Amino acid sequence: MAATIVKYLKKEENPIVTIYGRNEDAGKELADLFEVNFRKTLDIPTIIEECDVIITATTSKTILIEKGEIEKINKKMLLVDISNPKNIDENFINPSVELLNLEMANQIMEVNRKRK
């Protein structure tokens, strides 16, 4: 699914896409395939500082982006969690940050299907 998202993002005009991860082989392979950047890190504060959109697509069983980190964000940001299990804490209050996860995406798709 991560590859599908990168492919979609690359269709935009002059996107700056960076893949962050612990697994250098998998991350570099995906980055090379789509000619985007790769950084071996999961230093979440740095990633938040550098990005406007963060998409998590891991199988990590722990929350990677916690409520406290999200509540400190002082810029407009979109967080997309396509991980299973979820990797972004949903229990935050920050009007500058929008969260979309698989459950929400499925609800949106269901509404769109019913409209057709």
Image (cartoon, grey):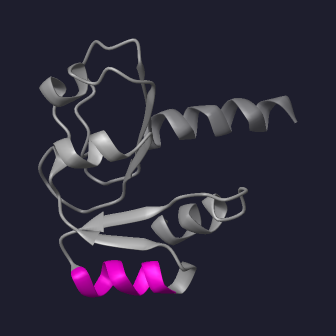
Where residue 98 appears, as percent x and y from the top left, is 44, 25
Tell me residue 8's x, y (percent).
65, 61
To which quarter of the image does residue 99 belong? top left
Q: Is residue 61 left or right of residue 90?
A: left
Q: Could you tell me which residue is drawn at 14 percent across and 53 percent down?
A: 43
Residue 29 within the magenta-colored segment of the rendering: yes
* Horizontal side, residue 16 vs residue 28: left or right: right
Q: Quadrant of residue 65?
A: top left
Residue shown at 43%/31% (left/top)? 77
The furthest residue to the right: 116
Q: Position of residue 87 (x, y in %)?
A: 24, 46
Majority SS type along the magenta span: helix
Q: Position of residue 51 (x, y in %)?
A: 39, 45
- What is the span of residues highlighted in magenta in the rendered image? 24-32
Toward the viewer: 78 or 17?
Answer: 17
Counting every numbered tag in the picture gives: 0
Residue 107 lies in magenta, yes or no?
A: no
| Residue 74 vertical placement versus 4 (above, below) | above
| Above or below: residue 105 compared with residue 82 | above
Q: Is residue 91 visible?
A: no
Quadrant showing the C terminus: top right
Residue located at (41% from left, 17% from top): 96
In this view, 80 is above or below 38: above
Residue placed most toward the observer, 2 or 29: 29
x 54%, y 39%: residue: 105
Q: Foreground residue, 34 or 14?
A: 14
The answer, for residue 3, to whether it is visible in the render is yes
Query: Who is closer to the viewer here, 49 or 84?
Result: 49
